[in-house]
Image: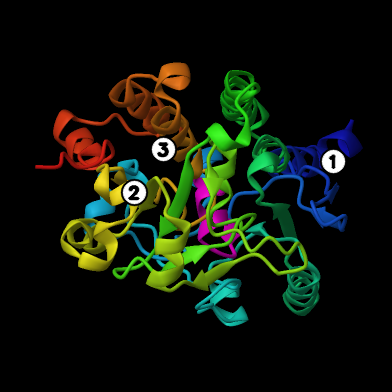
Amino acid sequence: MLSKLRSLPLMLACMALPFSAPARMIEDSAGRQVEIPGHIERVYAAGPPASILVYVLAPEKLAGWSRALRDHERSYIAAPFRDLPETGRLTGRGDSANLEVVLNTKPDLIVDFGSVRDTYVSLADRVQEQIGIPYLLIDGRFKNTPQALRLLGGVLGVPERAEELASYVERLLSGIDRALADIPPEQRPRVYMARGPAGLETGLKGSINTEIIERAGGRNVADPGDASIRRGIVQASIEQVIVADPDTIITWDPHFFAGVWHQPLWSGIEAVRRGRVYLSPTAPFGWIDRPPSVNRIIGLRWLSGLFFPERLGFDLREETRRFYRLFYHVELTEPELDRLIEWTSGRTLP
């Protein structure tokens, strides 16, 4: 009896210790075998696309925003997460974080969402080896969105949430495919993506920054034709835009949108003549790009209805409310909704 009593404090102490789930081995989108903790509390997002992916799935696990939210973006993010610190980025243009910054956030996991090319694999392996924190690469291509949600949702312990979001995306993608299956290429809109205040930065067909055009049923006029050319962001000339003569222009730059109607060199382009220049919302994240993450899903819904209203028309206000509630954890007020979608239907010409 005495020996049993002596062992009781030890037993109680063991029972009081927090349960530690065993580590798991995960295969990421690059085919890497990564050992991750059984329970993950904090995630460092390697770039803006990953920040959004983590936020929509499990905002309480996001260690910080790669770029702090701007004032006009804050109301479109759930209140508890608007003031998360700016943690910088490890990948992409303007990478601003070093490994000391990453360590200071005390993450259990690093996640990158986007390209899984060799360059990013090398970075992930190097960072993981140097600081000992598991680093997952998740394929950020549009068509991979449902798989990405399910993969990270399982890793973060929120599979039901991931399934809800992935199913929403799959229904949208399959609905667009069915609606547009019999429309030949020559009957699809010719679209130019105008980036920047001059409108002369764009993305080549197949670029992750503009793949939304083709996915919504449009034809990107910035098509080099040569499959060997690496797809990405390029500078165009106004002469090239005039020759391409798009019937639809999409932009997220308010300066370009406000000025294009008064620019003589743009005035002869079909899209401008017909008033078919549209301004994409950008709060809390861009609907088209900036960054190329799951924020593009509402942009896909918008563009498909814009391109083919007779087949894919819908109530933009109600669908926007639904998306922001489901993905961003916020209930939009009428003024917030008004500010967001004011120019999504283009401009009425005099």
Residue 56 rendering spot, x and y as whole percentages: 50, 40
Q: Is residue 189 magenta?
A: no
Q: Residues within 10 Å of mark 3 (few under 14, many from 20)?
A: some
Q: Against 320, is 66 above or below? A: below
Query: Which quarter of the figure has residue 84?
Result: bottom left
Of label 3 and label 2, which has the lower sequence position?
A: 2
| Region of the chain picked out in magenta, as a range | 43-55
Mark 3 residue type: Tyr
Contact between marks 3 and 1 (CB within 8 A): the answer is no
Of label 2 and label 1, which has the lower sequence position?
A: 1
Q: Nearer the viewer, residue 16 or 231?
A: 231
Which residue is disc 2 drawn over? 270
Residue 241 rendering spot, x and y as whole percentages: 42, 63
Mark 1 residue type: Ser
- Would residue 327 be found to the left or right of residue 75 on screen? right
Secondary structure, mark 1, is: helix
Which residue is disc 3 drawn over? 328
Q: Against 145, is 225 above or below? A: below
Query: Which quarter of the figure has residue 347?
Result: top left
Which disc, if any, is residue 7?
A: 1
Secondary structure, mark 3, is: helix
Secondary structure, mark 2, is: helix
- Would residue 330 be found to the left or right of residue 291 on screen? left
Q: Residue at x 55, y 64 (%)?
A: 47
Mark 2 residue type: Glu
Question: Quarter of the image containing the N terminus?
Answer: top right
Q: Nearer the viewer, residue 79 or 74?
A: 74
Q: Residue at x 61, y 56 (%)?
A: 205
Instruction: Tell me the distance, in whole angstroms, between the alpha carbons under discs 3 and 2.
Output: 36 Å
Of label 3 and label 1, which has the lower sequence position?
A: 1
Q: Residue at x 33, y 19 (%)?
A: 315
Residue placed furthest toward the left: 350
